[in-house]
Image (tube, grey):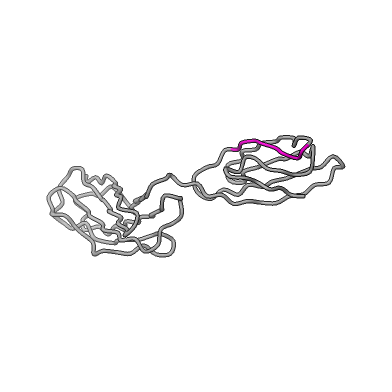
Amino acid sequence: DLIYMDPPFNTGKTQARSTVRLTNDVNGATSTVDAGSDGLWETGIAIGEGLNTITITITDLAGNVNTGTLELRRGSGKLRANLTGSTYRFKASSLPKRVTFTVVATDPDGSRLAGATALFTVSVPGLGPIVSDQVRTDRAGTATFTTNIPRGATKGPGLATVLITTDDLGSVFDRQVLSIE
């Protein structure tokens, strides 16, 4: 018998006195426990954010081994946006300079969020804000915005921001500091 596991996936039932070993293939966490005379067992294992694959190996008293896997997804419990740019530093003397910003949106369960609205804004000293059109995240939860930092920007700190908006989960933003040197 493999096992029956109850949420939160740290208790189960198998053949009496079998050894149960759980291994999280993502973060390497392991936990080993012996089932009782009734086959019940209880243990804990560290689960990281995102998709975790738990390999469950059960060895009975005769040495027979049965293995299976279970996928668990753990999120942060909130809508998230992660903004990155192709560059963050610009020389005023080398402008204009092309830059691409990418956002990855995830839902509260940690799954990539398709169909969210992304609005990018780039602000640098000496210029007015550069604002994107509204962009929808793709099936991978990703949206991009490419623009030029034009001539006329002056030395100092700037900011790239993205606002992610959804119909049912609300909104969230992220930002990255830019530098004009």
Left or right placement of residue 9 versus residue 105 in this view: right
Left or right placement of residue 141 versus residue 160 in this view: right
Q: Please state the horizontal and vertical placement of residue 35, each as a whole percent of the image.
A: 74, 37
Q: Residue furthest right?
A: 62
Image quarter of residue 134: bottom left
Left or right placement of residue 22 versus residue 166 in this view: right
- Our reading of the magenta stretch's main secondary structure is loop
**Up-down: is 108 above or below 137?**
above
Camera-side residue of 104 and 41: 41
Is residue 40 covered in magenta? Answer: yes
**Up-down: is 144 above or below 36?**
below
- Count of numbered labels shown in the rendering: 0
Image quarter of residue 116: bottom left
Camera-side residue of 128 and 72: 72
Q: Please state the horizontal and vertical placement of residue 139, each as a whole percent of the image.
A: 43, 64
Q: Which residue is drawn at 83% across and 46% down?
A: 64
**In which quadrant of the rendered image does the C terminus lie?**
top left
Camera-side residue of 143 and 98: 143
Q: Please state the horizontal and vertical placement of residue 117, each as a whole percent of the image.
A: 30, 61
Left or right placement of residue 53 versus residue 159 in this view: right
Q: Please state the horizontal and vertical placement of residue 65, each as a whole percent of the image.
A: 80, 47
The residues colored magenta run 38-45
Q: Residue at x 71, y 40 (%)?
A: 21
Is residue 14 covered in magenta? Answer: no
